[in-house]
Image (cartoon, rainbow, N blue to C red):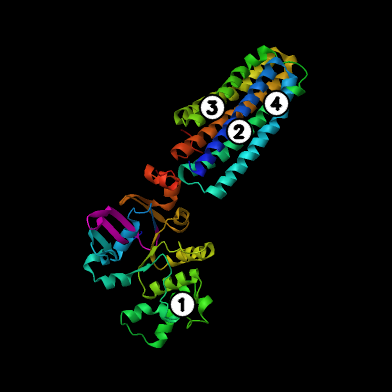
Amino acid sequence: MESTIIRSKNFNAYFGVNHVVKDVNIEIPKNHVIAVMGPSGCGKTTYLRCINRMHELIPGATCNGEMALNNEDVYSMHPIFVRLKIGMVFQRPNPFPNLSIYDNVIAGYKLNGIKLPKAEKDNVVERSLTRAALWKEVKDSLHKKGTFLSGGQQQRLCIARAIAMEPEVLLLDEPTSALDPISTSSVEDLLHELKANYTLVIVTHNMQQAARVSDRTAFFYLGELVEYDDTKKMFTNPRDNRTQNYITGRFS
Amino acid sequence: MAQLEVQLGLLKQEVINMWSLVRSQLIKAQTSLINFDKDLAREVILKERRVNGYELKIDRDCENIFALLTPVAIDLRFVLAVLKINSNLERIGDIAEGVAKYIVRTGQPFKPQLLEATKLTVMYEGSINILQDTLIAFENEDTILARSVFKKDEFLDDINLDANNLIENYLKENPGDIDQALYALSIIRKLERVGDQSKNISEEIIFYLEAKVLKHKHSH
């Protein structure tokens, strides 16, 4: 039976008085890829940033309702602990420009003051880069700067950096929107492999990407979760007319 | 209007045009049978190429829509349904051609009493009507009319099941009409396939509009 890793119940998010995520109820099963889609301004990225408490970093941003990780209230945990458990990858690859590939991967440990023996650091770097499908390409240039890599490789380096901390969930905010089709394809392939070890929540504007990579899809509109279902069902026979209009490009 | 919507509209019109041609082929084959009009039968045989041309064009259009416009949801079901309806219509076109070939081949006209006694006349009318119903159901997105086809197909099936007995009885009284009676039986068998193809088409219309799969289900 599928176990739920993230559960939102009557979850709301605001920017000042703007109600941007409205009463969202969603259960995300472990080791699945969940795509979150919807038009610009529908609240999908805000919802994503609420999952690992990044929303609250913006002045005036608030939220309420239940957000649980493994049945534990995320908002009762220390935010740093939450972000260790729920990693994030952003739209544009953002490796630390002054750090080598090696140091980028273990940056999370350094920033959190966690000291590891050299052999263990080497292990973390190799394991993370292997899981991010980058090891073979960079194993002989680990001490070169991360910014020398191509866009797709940099994004996979950011994924390696995120998974180095052994999170349970990885949030990806349009992770391929700045990449060319070949790099996009390699990141998408990677998502399929990563779900064996992690739960992935990906915000995407690209509906075909949502269809290709995810097991379930959530459709947001005007801050509401309109529909959340198996991706196959969503793209062949959506329940709600608003979903159908959106995915068939008939949205007014 | 989105490019996909434009292309789907054009595809729908193309299928309707093919449907009208196939229907006209079936009616002309019927007229050539009743009037023993070999020229009209030859016209049906020649025009079968146009039906095949439509089939190839519609296949190509569907392929392009899949490749270039990646339809989803109702649009995806529509294109999938059109692909299958296209092939069903092409087979009905083949049936009209097959009937026409019998007319060209046979040496003498079909006696009206043979057509009546074997219920071939009724069966032919029923086949044309059932095909017309599917066309209207497709054009108007009418799943109630599409569902009514299942019952009408059963009526054609019943005539087909009865055909051996009727032919046998007719031949007892008209032993000299063996050739014509066998042709009549073959035509009934072919028209029964028109009912089957129309039923398949109706299932596709319901699949596309309601996302329900009725194929291989005994009761609808």
Q: CA separation, marks 3 and 4?
A: 24 Å
The earlier-in-sequence mark between 2 and 3 is 2
The residue lying at 32 percent from left, 82 percent from top is: A114
Taking the image as drawn, is residue A73 in sight?
no
Q: What is the quadrant of the C terminus of chain A in the image?
A: top left
Image: magenta residue range: A5-34
Marks 2 and 3: which is nearer the front?
2
Q: CA separation, marks 3 and 1?
A: 69 Å
A3 displayed left or right of A180: left
Disc 2 + disc 4, Cβ < 8 Å: no
Marks 1 and 4: which is nearer the front?
1
The residue under label 2 is: B89
Amino acid type, residue under disc 1 in the picture: Gly
Is A38 in the magenta?
Answer: no
Element under disc 4: helix
Amino acid type, residue under disc 4 in the picture: Val
The residue under label 1 is: A146
Element under disc 2: helix
